[in-house]
Amino acid sequence: MTLNVTKIRTDFPILKRKIAGKPLVYLDNAATSQKPKAVIAAIDRYYQEYNANVHRGVHRLSEEATIAFEQSREKFARFIGAKTSKEIIFVRNATEALNLVALTWARANLRSGDRILLTEMEHHSNIVPWQMLAKEKGLRIDYVEIRDDGTLNWENFEQLIKERPKIFSLAHVSNALGTINPVRQMAREAHEMGATVIVDAAQSVPHMPVNVADLECDFLAASGHKMLAPTGIGMLYGRQDLLEHTEPLMGGGEMIKEVHLQGARWNDLPWKFEAGTPNIEGVIGLGAAVDYLTKLGMQNVREHEKDITRYAIERLANVKSLALYGTREIEKRGAVISFNLGDIHAHDLATILDTQGIAIRSGQHCAEPLMERLKVPATSRASFYIYNTRREADILVRALEKAAKMFKI
Ligand code: PMP
């Protein structure tokens, strides 16, 4: 066993909950993770002991809040291998991080007729901001196709990258299929063709070692709430030289060095991009979450998730009439399993499982183009994290077998 899951479970108060008289089996981690006591306590301590605005006051409380706030930035910078914490911009979520790149760096650097390359498996948050920019500036968007096994079609990528897109933006791990994309290999080719590489790491940073230098990416987006931290805190990594030469999106307090009636001078990185009072409690909670994950070891997290995913796939593959999506190669997938049971609609299935205390996701997973590609209206999705067990995978399988009997399929 790579993680002491029994011990980990005691750190998550919500896991003691019963739903309809049954123990909660929480398998919706790709949507958001549960929070350990250490994160809840860090936020509680902030409000009980040193609540104040950051970067402003010289009084003790403000100093303490600013130190905790900036320490969290340093912890996250180390966590993803950034060269300096100046490369970490705090935003609301991964969606805002991607929009921020689109509205600042990309808006300034792309011209009419330029191309953007995405993939068919992107979350809407890595499609729609680019469509909006494309409409504004007259850009063209191409999509790397996926193969039937849910991996990217390499030959198609090689063709499209030769068209010299200005941007190649892709998910590190697909939230709907679990596919882990070979980002580094693709980033190298993309850079050779002159593209800037943006990685949507919402589903990878919480689950495996992620290092921006190893990935060779220029920007990377992530969300705190999927990695044990509160909602409302997201992170954008950007290469320092790119951020230095990019104008901020929003103006106001915090993001300026000096303001006069006829103009203003921007603050240094990263504050240039952080106008207004930030989500201080969210950032402090993020710091505690990074500490918690660092202590477990991200390679251990990955090994644990591989074990449970392998086990769950083996068992699910034996459920009659169950269609599993995505590759079976465990090295190429994260802890997300999408499936359909016969012709039961995914929402009906999720509702039935809920009566047994099992929380799964159903629908299009904010990836409608992918659903069109798979030719399904929706899927059910079970996604695992550090506190899930093989026993919970068994409970899921038994509930699905029961549902199949109920619907006579
Ligand atoms: N990208 C991927 C791959 C995701 O799974 C998600 C969340 N489902 C997002 C982006 C957006 O994250 P958020 O809603 O936290 O902005």
Image: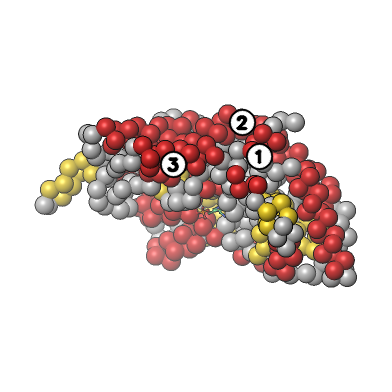
Judged from the image, the secondary structure of the residue bearing numbered disc 3 is helix
Instruction: Give the residue type at disc 2.
Output: Leu
Q: Nearer the viewer, residue 191 or 235?
A: 235
Inspect this view and state whether residue 290 appears: no
Among the two numbered marks 2 and 1 on one chain, the one whose residue lies closer to the N terminus: 1
Q: Amino acid at mark 1?
A: Arg
Q: Is mark 3 within 8 Å of ligand 1?
A: no
Give the quarter of the image for residue 19.
Answer: bottom right
**Observer-nearest residue: 407 or 203?**
407
Of marks 2 and 1, the one in the foreground? 1
Q: CA distance from mark 2 to mark 1?
A: 13 Å
Please name whichever residue, 116 or 52, is drawn nearer the observer in this view of the structure. 52
Secondary element at image label 2: helix
Element at label 1:
helix
Where residue 295 sits in the image (x, y, percent)? 58, 29
Query: Could you tell me the amino acid type at mark 3?
Result: Asp
Q: First in sequence, mark 2 or 3: give its number.
A: 3
Residue highlighted by disc 3 = 44
Q: Tell me the quarter of the image containing the N terminus.
A: top right
Res 9 label: 1
Give the spatial CA distance, label 3 vs label 1. Answer: 21 Å
From the image, tell me which residue sits under label 2.
Answer: 296
The answer to which of marks 3 and 1 sits earlier in the sequence is 1
